[in-house]
Image: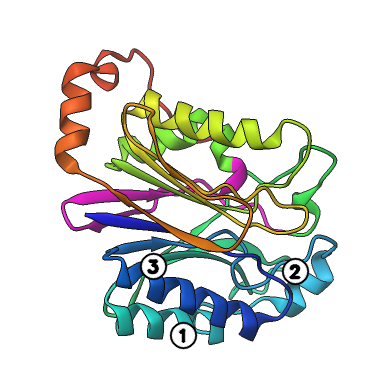
Amino acid sequence: MLMALAQLSATTDKPANLAAATDLIARAADAGAGLVVLPEYAMSWDARADAESLMADAETLDGPFVQGLAAAAHAHGVTLIAGMTERPADGSVLPANTVVALNAHGELIGAYRKIHLYDAFGDRESERLRQSAPEALVLAVGDLHVGVMTCYDLRFPEMARYLVDAGADVLAVPATWMAGPGKAAHWEVLARARAIENTAYVLASGQCGRHRTGRSTAIDPSGEVLVTLGDEPDVAVAEVSADKIAAVRERNPSLVNRRFTVHPR
């Protein structure tokens, strides 16, 4: 199966972001992709956003952004994964950093709310977004199973292993990986490490533009880089194979040889 990374540079203009995402989805589908991974905060992004502005910008899972994605998924016959800011239905004062998944019929088939909030490198994401409980979102896509995580989750090996234990053999990582000294290197090294230690594909789709790293990348189960984008909006397509996963896991049975398990707290 072909799977695509759709790298964009989101702003606070939500209709423009949706239009840009829809264009990238069309390009990915034209290239033969059955799954398209858009970045974290694909709906809207502002480096200076606080809790109040994020809540004002947030949408529900049946709002215009998800409806627009549903229309694109159905029109192009692809499964979509994309990040948004979700207005909570329970009356919480903070929105959630959410990744939605839609099938090729345009149906919402899952939502993952970020576990590890970005309280690092001088930022405090927990001051403007709600903390979510551990949850494994794993989607069946053809003969593969795609586990969903978000950006900062990539720095926690137990998150990827948690998804693999839930059946994932592909890890989709929508991200807005902030730029800075060493950050691009961290992005690649961590994506490759998560692929190698789990003998799984990693599809890391990042935002590009000011303050953001870009460099969306697909890694195979042996840790080889299949494709990498630069620092402009673009689409990259990689072949993802269940046979390749099986071959790598037979040669390197590290999942079988492990001596520890992962339990969320």
- Residue 104's image quarter? bottom left
Q: Which amino acid, mark 3?
A: Leu
Helix, strand or loop under label 2: loop
- Residue 26's image quarter? bottom left
Q: Closest to the observer: 122 or 185?
A: 185
Helix, strand or loop under label 3: strand
In the image, what residue occupies the spot 71% across and 67% down? 45
Q: Which amino acid, mark 2?
A: Val
**Is 263 rendered above or below residue 77?**
above
The verdict on residue 135 being magenta is: yes
**Is 127 rendered above or below residue 264?**
below
Residue position for label 3: 80
Q: Which amino acid, mark 1?
A: Gln
Q: Which residues are magenta?
A: 129-152
Q: Closest to the observer: 47 or 3?
A: 3
In the image, what residue occupies the spot 52% across and 74% down? 21
Helix, strand or loop under label 1: helix
Question: In which quadrant is the N terminus drawn?
Answer: bottom left
In the image, what residue occupies the spot 81% across and 73% down? 53
Horizontal and vertical percent position of residue 178: 72, 47
Residue position for label 1: 67
Q: Earlier in the sequence, mark 2 or mark 3?
A: 3
How packed mark 1 is, by other alpha carbons closer than 10 Å (few <14, some 14-19, many 20 or more), is some
The verdict on residue 209 being magenta is: no
Q: Earlier in the sequence, mark 1 or mark 2?
A: 1
Front of the two marks 1 and 2: 1
Residue 93's label in the rendered image is: 2
How packed mark 2 is, by other alpha carbons closer than 10 Å (few <14, some 14-19, many 20 or more), is some
